[in-house]
């Protein structure tokens, strides 16, 4: 029996009028009458004497009323408890990231957070480096973890720095610089470079060039690509030099590439967690406590 029908029975017992009870429960009088008849048929008992006005409950009808009140009250208590449970529960946390470096940084935080909040759902979404600020400002996520730091310049965004480090050169086997232990910036900029496109990394593209020019160099950016996989392939097969954060692992490419330290490099990176100043997600607030 549906709990709404149980309420109809209780109301009819207390009101003693089919018309008024039907109005109170927003159903037709015919539907209410049919329900009471089916209920009496189910138990093989008559619950109301319809030959008098107002209708009168029978002994069986009174017994069923008393039991129904108990059941309905228990239902209302359960509804109230579930509402409190929902209010107390923490909503999902929508996390956007842009690279393996970001995931590696997240992994150092998430286990401790999940230990304290095991039931919280974490929703991960991979985005392009240049999309971080948009995702935050348009409420497409609660927090962005990225080594693209253009969102730091947004007044509407707050951030916490998770990691800092230097960029390394990515050199493929067979390149003139492959066997070096380190590469001077002056030497590096004599060779063709490959970078992720401006559409992918946003303002990071221009900032890299600006930093090089501030040191008196003009980078030879021979090729741009839209993903890391194509970048690695081009480094290995076409002899370009690329860049990546020192914490990024490229073990899957085996001996075909090397990460080489850059001497006196102006190129540094930070991994930051950015979020909107107006975000009220309780889970985000708790998550931020785990970022030292």
Image (spheres, rainbow, N blue to C red):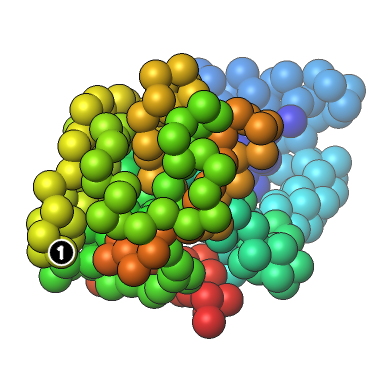
Give the percent coordinates (x, y) of residue 61.
Answer: 78, 42
Provide the secondary structure element on which disc 1 rests: loop
> Is the residue 27 above or below the residue 202 in the image?
above
Q: Which of 213 and 269 is in front in this view?
A: 213
Q: Name the residue under label 1.
A: 215
Give the percent coordinates (x, y) of residue 240.
Answer: 36, 29
Residue 60 relative to residue 204: left or right: right
Residue sitting at x 18%, y 37%: 220
* Residue 40 at least partly seen: yes
Residue sitting at x 46%, y 17%: 237
Residue 223 relative to residue 85: left or right: left
Q: Which residue lies furthest to the right in this view?
A: 44
Residue sitting at x 46%, y 31%: 175
* Residue 280 at least partly seen: no
Give the percent coordinates (x, y) of residue 79.
Answer: 63, 56
Residue sitting at x 58%, y 23%: 33
Q: How crowded is mark 1: few (under 14 residues within 10 Å), some or many (20 or more)?
A: few
Q: Nearer the viewer, residue 98 or 240?
A: 240
- Count of residue discs: 1
Give the percent coordinates (x, y) of residue 70.
Answer: 78, 57
């Amino acid at each position: 029996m549906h709990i709404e029908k149980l309420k109809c029975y209780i109301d009819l017992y207390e009101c003693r009028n089919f018309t008024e009870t039907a109005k109170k429960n927003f159903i037709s009088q015919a539907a209410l009458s049919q329900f009471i008849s089916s209920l009496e048929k189910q138990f093989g008992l008559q619950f109301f004497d319809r030959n008098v006005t107002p209708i009168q409950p029978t002994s069986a009808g009174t017994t069923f009323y008393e039991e129904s009140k108990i059941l309905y009250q228990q239902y209302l208590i359960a509804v109230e408890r579930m509402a409190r449970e929902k209010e107390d529960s923490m909503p999902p946390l929508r996390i956007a990231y842009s690279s393996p470096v970001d995931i590696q940084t997240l992994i150092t935080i998430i286990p401790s957070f999940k230990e304290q909040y095991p039931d919280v759902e974490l929703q991960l979404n991979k985005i392009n480096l240049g999309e971080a600020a948009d995702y935050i400002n348009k409420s497409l996520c609660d927090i962005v973890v990225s080594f693209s730091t253009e969102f730091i310049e947004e007044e509407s965004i707050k951030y916490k720095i998770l990691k800092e480090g230097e960029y390394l050169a990515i050199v493929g086997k067979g390149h003139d610089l492959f066997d070096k232990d380190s590469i001077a910036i002056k030497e590096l900029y004599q060779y063709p470079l490959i970078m992720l496109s401006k559409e992918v990394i946003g303002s990071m593209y221009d900032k890299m060039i600006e930093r090089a020019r501030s040191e008196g160099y003009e980078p030879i950016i021979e090729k741009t690509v839209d993903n890391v996989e194509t970048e690695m392939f081009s480094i290995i097969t076409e002899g370009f030099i690329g860049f990546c954060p020192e914490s990024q692992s490229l073990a899957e490419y085996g001996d075909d590439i090397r990460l080489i330290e850059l001497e006196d490099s102006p190129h540094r990176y930070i991994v930051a967690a950015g979020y909107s100043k107006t975000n009220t997600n309780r889970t985000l607030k708790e998550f931020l406590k785990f970022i030292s």
